[in-house]
Image: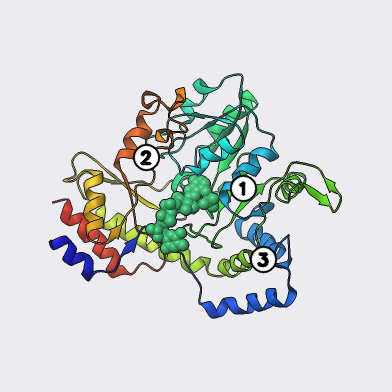
Amino acid sequence: MIDSVVTQASSPLYVTQPYLPALEEFIPYLEEIWKGKTLTNGGPYHQRFEQALSEHLGVEHVALFSNGTLALITALQALRVTGEVITTPYSFVATAHALHWHSNKPVFVDIDPETLNLDPKKIEAAITPQTTAILPVHCYGNPCDVQAIQDIADNYNLRVIYDACHAFGVEDGVGSILRYGDLSCLSFHATKVFNTFEGGAIVCPDAKTKQRINHLKNFGFVDEVTVVAPGINGKMSEINAAFGLLQLGHLQHVARRRAEVDALYREQLRDVAGLRCLPQFATGRANHSYFPVLVGDEFALTRDELYWHLKAHNVHARRYFYPLITDFPMYRGLPSAQPANLPVAKDVSARVLCLPIYPDLLRTDQERVIDLILGAGQ
Ligand code: T4K
């Protein structure tokens, strides 16, 4: 009864909310598109955004996509990945679905209890003669142990494709985290740190690979009469590219606000018994894309009780990533999907809760979330 009264009194807070610049700022971009009548297929905004994005990220080559999932599938196709691919069960389901759509068999390996990324110490035991690649995820934007993964890949002659859908703008001490591996895939979905409504990209190391990716995302066409590969339609439209170009100009504000929200949660939740915030692992720049907390046994509520408690007060935190990918019917029969193979991922998946974090989150609203947690923890 009390809960429903509170629900009516307070506006809903979601785990995220897309950042949108003022609408007036987008109008000139739309006018330009209306004038030129090029709506897609590598038009002027596509070219400008691609160039500006690679400069912003500090990488050589970027190929834009209509979403992160098609970027992942195309990356697998670009590198002609066959057979088994080692990956993490602790991710959004698109990571494994990309393998499924490319007819690769996912082989799930457990995660590291600190970073929640693929545990390099457990990869070698999962390699078979059919293994051709590793598909790790920089989960929540926290960098994987890229060096250890590359060493294993070099030893066993494996490709590495990073699912970097959470890792826009993340840097180590030297530069972009996206420069590691053979390819890295980004998502610019509405829920991401950087959004183009829907969108994605592949970061690639050389012009030749980018050209192959460009062919693949446009049905394999090289010219009007030549098709060199069984490509797909993965192109980003002009409207999304124009919006991306506009969004790039707002990133400083977005990054600052996210860092502030992150810092307030850390400060206020630091001493709550049974609640663990993940440390920040980016040695250069973090992107504060998510704010996961792990609910331990000492906390007064279980993770699910806390989730429902917040929901009853109109705070819609999310259990990213629960269930594990390996709990879904299309994967759970695989030998590598058995819970005994994935004890850390199982445990974390049962404890994690991602709290609201986004640039327009008002301090009073964030304090509401914090008060609810502090109240529940007593
Ligand atoms: N790899 C990884 C590691 C990923 O996390 C993802 C996507 C991918 C690959 C695939 O990339 P894409 O093909 O999507 O580019 C969301 C997103 O749909 C998904 O993109 C994202 N990961 C995943 C982690 O989260 P849902 O089902 O949780 O989204 P939804 O619709 O429940 O949105 C969450 C909250 O965000 C809503 O409660 C309200 C708010 N919201 C959402 C949308 C869509 C808005 O305020 N406005 C909006 O337009 O999957």
Q: Earlier in the sequence, mark 2 or mark 3?
A: 3
Whether label 2 touches label 3, CB < 8 Å: no
Which residue corresponds to mark 2? Answer: 323
Picture mark count: 3
Residue 47 in percent (x, y) is at 72, 62
Tell whether 3 sits left or right of 105: left
For label 1, the SS is helix
The amino acid type, in three-letter code, at marker 2 is Pro
Residue 229 in percent (x, y) is at 77, 41
For label 2, the SS is loop
The amino acid type, in three-letter code, at marker 3 is Glu
Which residue corresponds to mark 1? Answer: 71
For label 3, the SS is helix
Q: Earlier in the sequence, mark 2 or mark 1?
A: 1
- Give the residue furthest to the top: 129
Tell whether 235 sits left or right of 18: right
- Give the residue furthest to the front: 329
Q: Earlier in the sequence, mark 1 or mark 3?
A: 1
Which residue corresponds to mark 3? Answer: 238
State the separation of the CA atoms marked 2 and 3. Answer: 36 Å
| Mark 1 surroundings within 10 Å by alpha-carbon count, few (fewer than 14), some (14 through 19), many (20 or more) | many
